Image: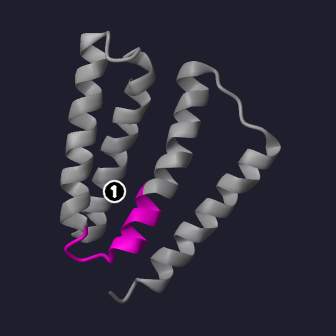
Amino acid sequence: MGWMHLIIAILTEVVGTTALKAAEGFTRPVPSAIVCVGYGLSFYFLSLALKTIPVGVAYAVWSGLGIIMISVLARIFYAQTLSPAALVGMGLIVAGVCVLKLSSAGQ
């Protein structure tokens, strides 16, 4: 269940962070509420994941996959672009997350 909790933590963090731009400094109520609920749920599920996944592994996966997913959504919703170097960096993040997942498979 730890990895399922971590996936939920990542998804809710991504929703919250994506809504953060739309909240415009917490001046828009609906996106602001989405930010608060998203982050609240994210930390709750991250805390559940930490019961069975080492904190270093969980945080690396949570932040790494979050960065990638947010970058993709920023491209879709806000037309933000990434340089080739940024894309290479994200590829390295994916590789690192895969290594972490494989190395902790027996835990």
Q: Measured from the top left, where is residue 40 in percent x and y?
A: 20, 42
Q: How many marks?
A: 1
Instruction: Say which amino acid is labelled 1.
Output: Ile
Circle 1: is it few (<14), some (14-19), or many (20+) Cα within 10 Å? many
Check the image and report above or below for 27 versus 34: above
Helix, strand or loop at mark 1: helix
Residue position marked by numbered label 1 in the rendering: 7
Check the image and report above or below for 70 versus 67: above
Image position of 40 (left or right of 16): left
Residue at x 70%, y 29% (from the top left corner)? 81
Image position of 28 (left or right of 41): right
Specify the principal SS of the magenta part: helix
Q: Measured from the top left, where is residue 102 in percent x and y?
A: 49, 81
Quarter of the figure with residue 92 = bottom right
- Quadrant of the image containing the C terminus: bottom left
Residue with the most extreme bottom position? 106
Residue at x 23%, y 31% (from the top left corner)? 36
Image position of 8 (left or right of 58): left
Residue at x 34%, y 34% (from the top left corner)? 16
Q: Nearer the viewer, residue 76 or 33?
A: 33
Q: Measured from the top left, where is residue 106 in percent x and y?
A: 36, 89
Q: Measured from the top left, where is residue 9 in percent x and y?
A: 30, 52
Check the image and report above or below for 66 versus 94: above
Provide the residue span drawn in magenta. 50-62
Check the image and report above or below for 64 versus 67: below
Q: How is the image coloured?
A: one colour
- Quadrant of the image containing the N terminus: bottom left
